[in-house]
Image (cartoon, grey):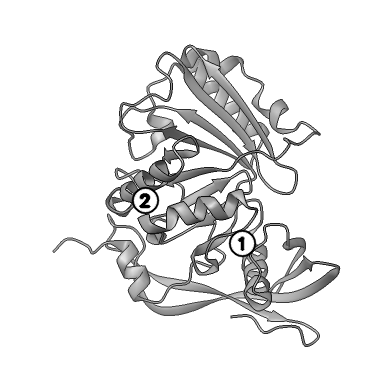
């Protein structure tokens, strides 16, 4: 019997998406509407100079994540032009765009320099990238494509399909850039409200937020714990400002308003093991973040 869909298994096992966002402050988005393989970027049919340039950039910037994007299969955003977008997430976001005539032109871009610019982009409009990479995991195609279409219907200029984002057991999964909020278990009916919330400077549905990609996962968990306690979705309301690993987990400093709070954060195994990918029969245990606030601060999940 074929393995069950990993996204359904994760939900049935009560897995929490909190603190599971991909960790990557810098992103490079390359338009490629061809069918994508399991390792979409590595298998892209570009020239050697392009792959060498990407390898050099990722060696220079260890937190650079390269994604393929498209409006749809075999559909160019503007025929004859290749969109390329560099994004820095976090408190000083940057969005830099290029329109290229050929993939070989990628190698000439100064991607690290653009992302390390000391200035930030004034109020960059949000982009939503929904994973539809079915060759990587069946869940991303089955449930990701309807969500991507709903995003395109709601915000055609802002919505992109993308290659593997990480964590397909939370499919459909999408990331909003440049603020870097990573979501899981989205529904087509969510997408119009999600885009509206981010345009207004807010997160959408804290129960579907996995975390902010610019933050380490223990910090993601602590920030979401505090957001839930304060019942706040404003993007700038809560931010991690310190992280220290110790023998029992991590101590995380979180800033909310004029107050900095400290939390002890650790992981525990939860629920019975299950396959974390559709193509796998290997059962792995679920892991959940636990957050305990110090000095009588709010109790975490």
Cα gap from disc 1 to disc 2, whole angstroms: 25 Å
| Rendered-image quadrant of the N terminus | bottom left
Total marks shown come to: 2
Asked which secondary structure carries label 2, the reply is helix
Instruction: Check the image and report above or below for 75 versus 232.
Output: above
Instruction: Check the image and report above or below for 78 versus 261.
Output: above
Image position, residue 80 (x, y; %): 42, 13
The residue carrying mark 1 is 217
Asked which secondary structure carries label 1, the reply is helix
Q: Residue at x 80, y 74 (%)?
A: 261
Residue 114 shows in this picture: yes
Instruction: Check the image and report above or below for 55 versus 246.
Output: above
- The label nearer to you, 1 versus 2, is 2
Image position, residue 48 (x, y; %): 46, 17
Q: Residue at x 60, y 26 (%)?
A: 97
Please rate how many residues cluster around mark 1, counting C-alpha atoms within 10 Å: few if below 14, some from 14 to 19, many from 20.
many
Q: From the viewer's perspective, is 265 left or right of 46?
A: right
Image position, residue 140 (x, y; %): 34, 50
| Rendered-image quadrant of the C terminus | bottom right
Q: Residue furthest bottom?
A: 296
Q: From the viewer's perspective, is 205 left or right of 297?
A: left
Image position, residue 228 (x, y; %): 62, 74
Q: Earlier in the sequence, mark 1 or mark 2?
A: 2
**Disc number placed over residue 147 in the picture, else none:** 2
Q: Residue at x 65, y 45 (%)?
A: 25
């Amino acid at each position: 019997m074929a393995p069950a869909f990993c996204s359904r298994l994760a939900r049935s096992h009560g897995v929490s998406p909190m603190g599971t966002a991909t960790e990557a402050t810098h992103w490079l988005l390359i338009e490629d509407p061809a069918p994508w393989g399991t390792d979409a970027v590595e298998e892209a049919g570009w020239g050697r100079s392009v792959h060498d340039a990407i390898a050099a950039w990722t060696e220079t910037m260890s937190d650079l994540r390269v994604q393929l994007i498209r409006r749809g299969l075999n559909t160019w955003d503007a025929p004859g032009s290749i969109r390329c977008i560099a994004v820095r997430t976090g408190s000083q976001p940057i969005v830099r765009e290029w329109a290229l005539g050929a993939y070989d032109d990628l190698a000439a871009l100064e991607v690290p320099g653009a992302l390390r610019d000391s200035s930030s982009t004034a109020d960059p409009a949000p982009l939503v990238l929904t994973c539809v990479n079915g060759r990587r995991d069946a869940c991303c195609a089955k449930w990701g494509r309807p969500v991507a279409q709903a995003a395109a219907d709601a915000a055609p200029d802002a919505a992109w399909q993308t290659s593997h984002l990480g964590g397909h057991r939370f499919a459909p999964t999408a990331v909003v850039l440049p603020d870097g909020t990573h979501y899981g278990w989205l529904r087509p009916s969510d997408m119009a409200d999600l885009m509206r919330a981010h345009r207004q400077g807010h997160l959408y549905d804290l129960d579907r937020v996995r975390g902010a990609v610019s933050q380490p996962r223990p910090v993601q968990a602590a920030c979401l714990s505090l957001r839930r306690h304060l019942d706040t979705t404003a993007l700038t309301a809560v931010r991690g400002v310190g992280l220290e690993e110790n023998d029992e987990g991590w101590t995380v400093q979180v800033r909310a308003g004029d107050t900095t709070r400290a939390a002890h954060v650790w992981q525990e195994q939860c629920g019975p093991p299950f396959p974390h990918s559709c193509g796998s029969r290997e059962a792995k245990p679920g892991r959940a973040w636990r957050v305990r606030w110090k000095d009588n601060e709010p109790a975490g999940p």
